[in-house]
Amino acid sequence: MHQSSAQLFKKYLREKNISPQEFSQISGMPETEVLGIIKGNLPISNLRAHHLAAAFDTDVELWLHGDRKMKEKEVNHRLKQLSPVGSE
């Protein structure tokens, strides 16, 4: 199963035993952005992906890929809701 960037971010924070506040200080990202990512309210922009990758010593694509997949799922879900009944 594919993890969203928010889920992946929370997993990394747990594994490294880092609070959102500590991550903000380590990464240079504002705490409001860190919390927004955790809550799933903020997408992973290119700049945020670079901050996450640098802080966790991972590849930028790891963070961008997860967010892109979640957006695709949301769009597909919305399209299914809009399709007329009986068109399936």
Image (cartoon, rainbow, N blue to C red):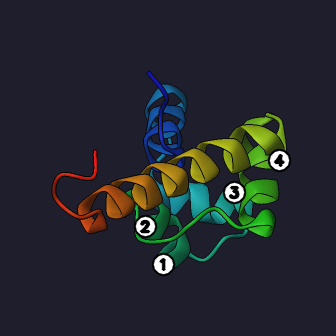
Q: Is residue 19 above or below residue 2?
A: below
Distance, label 4 to label 3, CA atoms, is 10 Å
Kindly identify which numbered label has been placed on residue 32: 1
Q: Amino acid at mark 4?
A: Ala
Kindly identify which numbered label has been placed on residue 26: 3
Q: Residue drawn 79% across and 34% down?
A: 58
Foreground mark, 2 or 3, reads 2
In the displayed image of the protein, which residue is found farthest to the top? 1
- Front residue of 51/5: it is 5
Instruction: Using a 10 Å C-alpha cutoff, classify the residue at mark 3 as few (fewer than 14 neighbours), some (14 to 19) or many (20 or more).
Output: few
Q: Secondary structure at mark 3?
A: helix
Q: Residue drawn 48% across and 78% down?
A: 32
Instruction: Using a 10 Å C-alpha cutoff, classify the residue at mark 2 as few (fewer than 14 neighbours), some (14 to 19) or many (20 or more).
Output: some
Distance, label 3 to label 1, CA atoms, is 14 Å
Q: Along the polypeptide, which appears first: circle 3 or circle 1?
A: 3
Contact, mark 2 vs mark 1 (Cβ under 8 Å): yes
Q: Secondary structure at mark 4?
A: helix
Q: Along the polypeptide, which appears first: circle 4 or circle 1?
A: 1
In the image, 29: left or right of 23?
Answer: right
Q: Along the polypeptide, which appears first: circle 2 or circle 3?
A: 3
Kindly identify which numbered label has been placed on residue 35: 2
Residue 59 percent coordinates (x, y): 83, 36
Q: Amino acid at mark 1?
A: Thr
Kindly identify which numbered label has been placed on residue 67: none
Q: Secondary structure at mark 1?
A: helix
- On-image quarter of the C terminus: top left
